[in-house]
Image (cartoon, grey):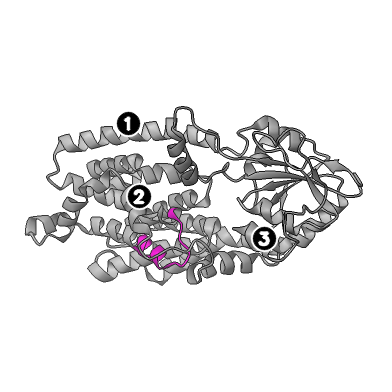
Amino acid sequence: VYVLGRRIVGERAAFWGALTLALAPGWVSMGRLLLMDSLLTFLTTMALLSAFEAVRGDRLCWGWWLVASAACGLGVLTKGPVALVLVLPPLWLQRWLTGSGCRIGRAGMLGCLFVVLAVTLPWYAAMTQRVPTFLRDFLWEHNIRRFLAPYAHEHGIWFYIPVLLIGLLPGTLLLAPFLRFLLSSDAACAARRTVEWSFLLLAGGWCLFFFTLSQCKLPTYIMPAFPMLCLAFGHFLVHSRTPLLALRTGGIVAFVVLALVHHVVTPWYAAYRSPVGRPAEVRRLCSDKSTAVVCYPRNCDSAAFYLRRADLRSYRSKNIDDLRTLVRLRPRTVILCTHRHSLEGLHQLLPPDVHIVEEVHYGLEDIRGVPPRLMKVLVQLMGETALGLCDIAVVEPSWVHPNTLLNQTNRVGGPPPGQASWVGPRPDRPAPSPSGRAASEQ
């Protein structure tokens, strides 16, 4: 951001913009997630800044234009055509609104198209040959349908406003003077609003506007807007009358808070809610590779990683018949329940001849020194169980231990001494019904 940004807004503005980005909690937090959005953000940032550098003169600079085209191609390879949607409209809008910059022309567009296709087509062709439904699943389901229909993660139109305001702290503390700089009719202030600054603001605003229209919304979707808006903010800091003491104080406070959050709070929270926070229990039940371990209804990747098992399969409720078949055939199956109500659903959905012989509940433990009333509130806020692992159920078919009385429950704290329950449907549980599927998916 700093290296390319200084060519557009200058050395000082690029420095303040990069510093604002480095201190932004939303950027630091979301950028560390193991998602494609971070890579897409890097590529779209390179494409936008390189493309603007290519068209800002009287003639198209082919070197920068090919760099931008290659970045677009890698962006399409990373997460689909959305990379082109984030890059091309701001370039066109900038020229249409200001009349500045050179005309790209047919040769430039064909050159960009050629580079993008050269980067993406080999991989798309290989994937289509290997998985015939790849193009439909990837382009239609995960690009077009997610944008047009409430596929998942449906939120209101204002969803990204708090994400942006909180994510760009401490910069958003200067939102009021920034808006005055943006809207002021003063001639001196207007002269400082350069074409370069307007492009950065337009590129960031377009990303925010585009994903606001999407029916599927996640905070990480607007990450490509962060570098553009921070560079625009850096230009504002350099050309405004913001007190230097306030900037230094805000930067120091933001650095200290971020350091505490990411080096103290985040590791503690990750350990507290880790699915393998009790490793001995997980290894006891899941380390034997001759025992089938499955996830229901979603993956538990942390368990697979720490157990070094690549054979964990996940079953959704729509695949419940496959899971029924598996547990009937295997002498012992360990089911990792990844939703709070999954175990309740299993009690209703398992076949009559397959019984749960052991249960382990992964509820959050009390934090030392926290009052019980406050602890209850914190547990509800944090989700009540480990992140991505709520219960473990060990199931066996009747042919393994016919007519045997087994202990049904092994929860934290343990059942009362001597308490046992019959293998098979318990009299206090409802009979299997389709409604169990809905309960297990919640």
Residue 7 visible in this rendered orientation of the protein: yes
Q: Quadrant of the C terminus?
A: bottom right
In terms of depth relative to the viewer, which is nearer, 115 or 130?
Answer: 130
First in sequence, mark 3 or 2: give its number: 3
Q: Identity of the amino acid at label 2? A: Pro
Q: Is residue 67 visible?
A: no
**Vertical order, 396 against 247 (above or below):** below
Q: Residue at x 23, y 67 (%)?
A: 98
Coordinates of residue 378 in the picture (x, y in percent): 45, 41
Q: Which stretch appears magenta?
A: 206-219
Q: Quadrant of residue 2?
A: top left
Q: CA distance from mark 1 to mark 3?
A: 46 Å
- Distance in Å between CA atoms under marks 3 and 2: 32 Å
Task: Please name the amino acid that badge 3 sits on.
Answer: Met
Relative placement, left or right, of 191 versus 424 is: left
Name the residue rendered at 80%, 38% in the picture: 289
- Answer with the quarter of the image where residue 410 lies: top right
Q: Position of residue 96 (x, y in %)?
A: 28, 71
Amino acid beneath label 1:
Val
As for residue 214 lying within the magenta part, the answer is yes
Residue at numbered disc 3: 127
Which numbered marker is on residue 227? 2
Q: Closer to us: mark 1 or mark 3?
A: 1
| Label 2 CA crowd tier, 10 Å (few <14, some 14–19, many 20+) | many
